[in-house]
Image (cartoon, rainbow, N blue to C red):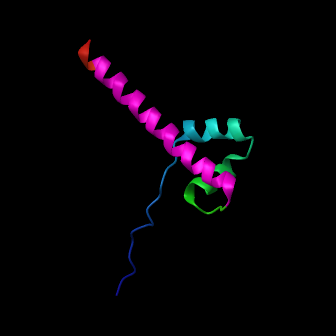
Amino acid sequence: MNKGTKKAEYNQHNVDAITALVEKFGLSAYYIRQSVNGNRNGVVPDKIRKEYKEICKQLDDAKTKAVENFKKQ
């Protein structure tokens, strides 16, 4: 009987989105990451989670558009 060697899945955060939220809210990056993970409860963490999702979606859309424009050239 061997122990499993698989590590827990690690969820990486978008650094640009975290940085933008730090600047907007004036909170630490640690608190922002904890809020996004759901480890913090309250009104502000809920706002942070919502805005993080919006920022990530906008960044992904912009990245997709840039790749499409590059392919057309």
* Main SS class of the magenta portion in the image: helix
Residue bounds of the magenta highlight: 42-70
Confirm whether residue 54 shows in the render. yes
Q: Position of residue 4 (x, y in %)?
A: 38, 76
At x 39%, y 71%, the residue is: 5
Horizontal side of residue 39 vs 71, given as left or right: right
Q: Residue at coordinates 56% horizontally, 36% vertically from top-left?
A: 16
Seen from this angle, which residue lies furthest bottom?
1
Q: Quadrant of the N terminus?
A: bottom left
Q: Is residue 27 left or right of residue 47?
A: right
Quarter of the figure with the C terminus: top left
Is residue 18 placed above or below 11 in the rendered structure?
above
The x, y position of residue 6, in whole percent, is 39, 69
- Relative side of 54 to 6, left or right: right
Residue at far right of view: 26
1 or 7: nearer the viewer:
7
Above or below: residue 72 compared with residue 64? above
Q: Is residue 68 magenta?
A: yes
**Which residue corresponds to the image point at 62% horizontal and 35% vertical from the top-left?**
20
> Where residue 2 sits: x, y (%)?
36, 83
Extreme residue in the left direction: 72
Residue displayed at 75% across by 40% down: 26
